[in-house]
Image (cartoon, coloured by chain):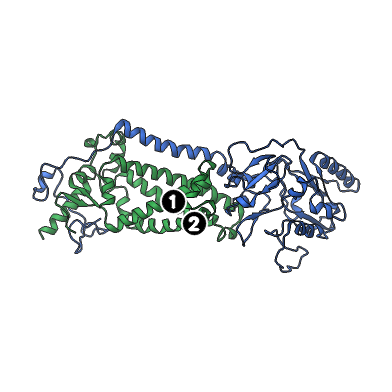
């Protein structure tokens, strides 16, 4: 793929397809799950064709999310470990929130906020899977003792809460940081964007390109 | 569901249910275990009145038949053999089924509006037409009573013959019991009746006789007279102090409004942040240019080298065109 010189590829077509499939599945899961969580949200069960269909489909969508998410997550573990300048970036969270980006140290492909989203989802989706299987009627719940199902039900609600809040933060961050939605829809960012928001990653990419051009 | 106007509690509902016809006395069924002969006539009457037909099961070497409650067997006799320390064998027979708790765990746990209701007379009824088959009622029940039918995935249990009671009749099991072991009336009357029976049993030498009307669930509308009320567990595992599990309480209690509020506040905080601080705008194009710019002028240490074998392949372009790395 020919890319204009002022752009860098940030997300491959496969990553983007995976991301938006997950996004749709997650929204359906969250809406149908909230419907069972609080009566105020019960009307949301109609997004999956009514409460009974929501009860039937929700767990299968959950399995789909788990497969999509961990297929993505395993490939990005190293990029989400605590990296150079991350601690300093977190200390300056005030500067981050106040948009004083020029004061921030350069960071890698993902900033600590994105890494937090990553790990929050890695943990919460795992807990959702385990607790969800234990609650899953009619297929699995019958194999588990009722006290365990009670614990799983509470764990499922708390994990889902963590996941939903995380995704709300994730969505807001995408709206907040201009250029990041385009990165996930079209795949590319401008070099200026990369240098501004992810200096270490931009340098790494540009170095790699330079070495390829001058073997 | 046989009376839609005397409902005092309704599942997954945060406003008052219709209760204009709620000026009725609380009812109760009293099961005097000491008078039960285990004939199972109540099971048959239950099947007959409620038009239930269970599958023929298997014999497990006990009198229990069927061996457990099912979506088609809303009451079963449970036979326990108990050997006392003095070496006496006691054959304890308990009619198991829904206890119609004053504070029903099933109703607390149910996420489907109106699928479980509690009438002013105390009967806890499943409106299975609204049931979604999630099984939360099973999770919520301290007595392990509701059963989901494998045929329609709806939850079922004893209705205390709410249809009969609503028409001024006693439940089918009460009507058929040949020893008057099962009685039915107002809760006040049944408690008085129970106290009398407890007195009789004490005279007969059962010092620990007592009424089973557990306070942990606010009392029940199905009560037992037990000869050994000090150890209800003896009667096929009847819980001594049943209550809605704290896990269910946490799951269906404070966490619901609290976590819902936090989700809303988080989204709202985003809106406020955007309106006050504004977005991180797309940075201006770098006037220093790009590919042909000498590395020194890029504003960072150009002597940096990526690891020789980059672990996730990001730096080893490996035949892929430049920039195709994720």
Q: Give the quarter of the image for residue A193.
A: top left
Whether tag 2 and tag 1 are in contact, CB under 8 A, the answer is: yes
Find residue A103 and report its horizontal and vertical position in percent.
23, 35
Q: Which chain is green?
A: A
Does residue A93 appear to the left or right of B237 in the view shown?
left
Note whether B79 is above or below A104 in the view shown.
below
In the rendering, which numbered label is found on residue A28? 1
Q: Give the quarter of the image for residue B118.
A: top right
Q: Circle 1 sits in a helix, a strand or a loop, which is it?
A: helix
Name the N-terminal-most of marks 2 and 1. Answer: 1
Q: Colour of chain B?
A: blue
Note whether B237 is above or below B56 in the view shown.
above
In the rendering, which numbered label is found on residue B152? none
Find residue B307 and report its horizontal and vertical position in percent.
21, 56
For disc 2, the marked residue is A57
Visible residue check, residue B222: no
Does residue A206 appear to the left or right of A131 in the view shown?
left
Note whether B177 is above or below B296 in the view shown.
below
Question: Label 1 is found on which chain of the structure?
Answer: A
Residue at 14%, 48% in the rendered image: B302
Residue at 49%, 56% in the rendered image: A57
């Amino acid at each position: 793929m020919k890319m204009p010189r002022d752009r860098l590829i940030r997300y491959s077509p496969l990553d983007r397809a995976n991301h938006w499939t997950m996004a749709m599945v997650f929204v359906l899961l969250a809406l149908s799950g909230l419907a069972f969580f609080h009566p105020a949200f019960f009307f949301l069960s109609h997004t999956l064709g009514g409460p009974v269909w929501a009860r039937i489909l929700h767990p299968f969508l959950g399995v789909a999310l788990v497969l999509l998410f961990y297929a993505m997550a395993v490939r990005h573990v190293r990029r989400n470990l605590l990296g150079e300048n991350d601690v300093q970036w977190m200390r300056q969270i005030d500067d981050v929130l106040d948009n004083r980006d020029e004061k921030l140290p350069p960071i890698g492909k993902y900033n600590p906020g994105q890494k937090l989203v990553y790990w929050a989802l890695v943990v919460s989706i795992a807990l959702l899977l385990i607790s969800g299987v234990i609650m899953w009627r009619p297929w699995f719940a019958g194999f588990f003792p009722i006290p365990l199902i009670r614990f799983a039900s509470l764990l499922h609600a708390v994990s889902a809460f963590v996941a939903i809040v995380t995704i709300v933060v994730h969505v807001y961050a995408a709206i907040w940081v201009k250029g990041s939605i385009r990165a996930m829809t079209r795949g590319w960012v401008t070099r200026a964007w990369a240098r501004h928001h992810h200096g270490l990653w931009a340098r790494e990419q540009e170095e790699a390109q330079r070495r390829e051009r001058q073997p | 569901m046989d009376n839609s106007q005397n409902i005092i509690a309704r599942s997954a509902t945060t406003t008052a249910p219709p209760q204009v016809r709620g000026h009725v006395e609380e009812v109760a069924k009293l099961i005097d275990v000491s008078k039960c002969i285990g004939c199972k006539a109540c099971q048959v009457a239950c099947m007959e009145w409620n038009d239930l037909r269970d599958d023929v099961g298997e014999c497990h070497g006990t009198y229990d038949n069927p061996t457990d409650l099912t979506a088609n067997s809303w009451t079963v006799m449970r036979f326990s053999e108990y050997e006392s320390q003095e070496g006496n064998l006691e054959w304890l027979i308990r009619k198991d089924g829904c206890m119609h708790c004053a504070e029903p765990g099933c109703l607390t746990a149910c996420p489907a509006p109106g699928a479980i209701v509690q009438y002013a007379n105390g009967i806890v009824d499943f409106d299975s037409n609204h049931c979604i088959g999630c099984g939360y009622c099973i999770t919520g029940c301290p007595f392990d009573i509701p059963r989901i039918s494998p045929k329609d995935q709806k939850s079922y249990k004893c209705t205390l013959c709410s249809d009969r009671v609503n028409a001024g009749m006693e439940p089918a099991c009460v009507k058929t019991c040949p020893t008057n072991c099962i009685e039915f009336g107002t809760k006040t009357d049944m408690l008085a009746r129970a106290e009398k029976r407890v007195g009789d049993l004490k005279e007969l030498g059962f010092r620990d006789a007592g009424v089973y009307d557990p306070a942990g669930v606010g009392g029940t509308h199905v009560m037992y007279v037990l000869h050994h009320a000090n150890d209800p567990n003896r009667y096929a595992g009847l819980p001594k102090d049943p209550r809605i599990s704290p896990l269910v309480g946490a799951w269906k209690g404070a966490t619901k409004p609290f976590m819902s509020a936090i989700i809303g506040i988080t989204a709202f905080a985003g809106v406020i942040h955007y309106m006050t601080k504004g977005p991180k705008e797309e940075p201006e194009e770098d006037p220093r240019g790009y590919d042909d710019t000498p590395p020194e002028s890029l504003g960072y240490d150009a002597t940096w080298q990526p690891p020789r074998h980059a672990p996730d392949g990001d730096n080893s372009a490996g035949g892929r065109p430049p920039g195709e790395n994720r």
